[in-house]
Every structure is written in C-alpha cells, then in structure tokens.
Image (tube, rainbow, N blue to C red):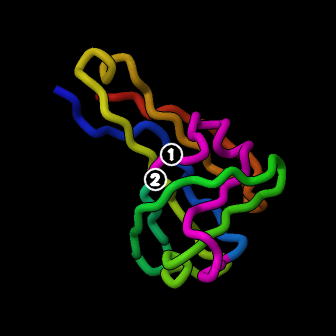
C-alpha cells in the first residue's frame, strides 16, 4: 500500500510577487528547490501564514539566486507580497520507502536564500 507522506518543505519563504493575470503556478528560486529536492512541475500545497489560506498548485522554476517566490494565477488572490508561505511537497511511499525517508526542510533567510536545511526524522 502507498501512503501520501511529506517529502520536503520550504518553511516561511517570503512572497516576492503576486501575479493574478499570469499563467497559474508558484515560481520558486531554483536554489531553494535544490536544497530539498523539489522540481519544476511538482505538485505542492502552499499555506499562507498571514491568513491561513491553503491552495494546491505546481512549481515553476525560478532563476537560481533570484530569491523569487511568486504566486501566479488565481491563487495570487489568496496572497499578498511579503506574506510568509510554507510550501509542502508530498510523495507516495510504501512502508519500506517510508522507513528510510527523512523529509528535508529548508528555512530560507529573509531574502529567500538558502538558510538552514534540516531533516525530520520519522518517529
């Protein structure tokens, strides 16, 4: 049996732009993605720490070192520039995969550069 579990997370990234008229997605600096193993087109759930809204979207690749965390399309109506976001990436794993998996988390610095990278240890 496969279960949906946390693969990785970007914790408290700062929204740099909201673009409701842009093709929908979440643009994220490639360096943040690489730090936790996320990829362009991966499905993610985004939580807005200011207002509690959550939405599902997919990742667009942002230029490395740009610090971009941009919410595009309809979801842009749920976010304001400067909001802190948590980006949750899930994966389906069987029990053997789960036992060997430690979700990676990046806590960006205020400019959305890679700050701390930590691993959650399944208990």
Q: Quadrant of the N terminus?
A: top left
Give the quadrant of residue 3. Answer: top left
In the rendered structure, are the residues bearing label 2 and label 1 in contact, judged by CB atoms less than 8 Å apart?
yes
- Mark 2: which secondary structure? strand
Picture residue at 51% right of the left edge, 55% below the top = 58
Q: Position of residue 23 (x, y in %)?
A: 60, 70
- The label on residue 42 is 1
Residue position marked by numbered label 2 in the rendering:
44
- The vertical placement of 97 against 6, above or below, is above
Tell me the SS state at disc 1.
loop
Residue at horizontal 25 percent and vertical 23 percent from the top:
94
Which stretch did the figure color magenta?
18-43
The correct choice, above or below, for 19 with respect to 89 in the image is below
* Camera-nearest residue between 22 and 9: 22
Pinpoint residue 101: horizontal percent, then vertical percent: 40, 23
Name above or below for residue 11 compared with residue 75: above
Residue 71 disc label: none
Position of residue 53 measured from the top left corner of the image (x, y, whole percent): 40, 75
Q: Is residue 51 left or right of residue 32?
A: left
């Amino acid at each position: 049996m496969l279960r949906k579990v946390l693969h990785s997370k970007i914790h408290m990234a700062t929204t740099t732009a909201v673009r409701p008229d842009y093709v929908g997605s979440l643009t994220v600096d490639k360096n943040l993605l690489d730090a936790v193993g996320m990829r362009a087109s991966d499905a993610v759930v985004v939580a807005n720490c200011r207002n509690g809204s959550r939405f599902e979207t997919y990742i667009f690749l942002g230029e490395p070192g740009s610090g971009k965390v941009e919410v595009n399309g309809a979801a842009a109506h749920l976010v304001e520039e400067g909001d802190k976001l948590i980006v949750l990436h899930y994966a389906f794993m069987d029990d053997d995969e789960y036992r060997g998996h430690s979700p990676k988390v990046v806590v960006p610095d205020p400019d959305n550069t890679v700050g701390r990278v930590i691993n959650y240890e399944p208990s």
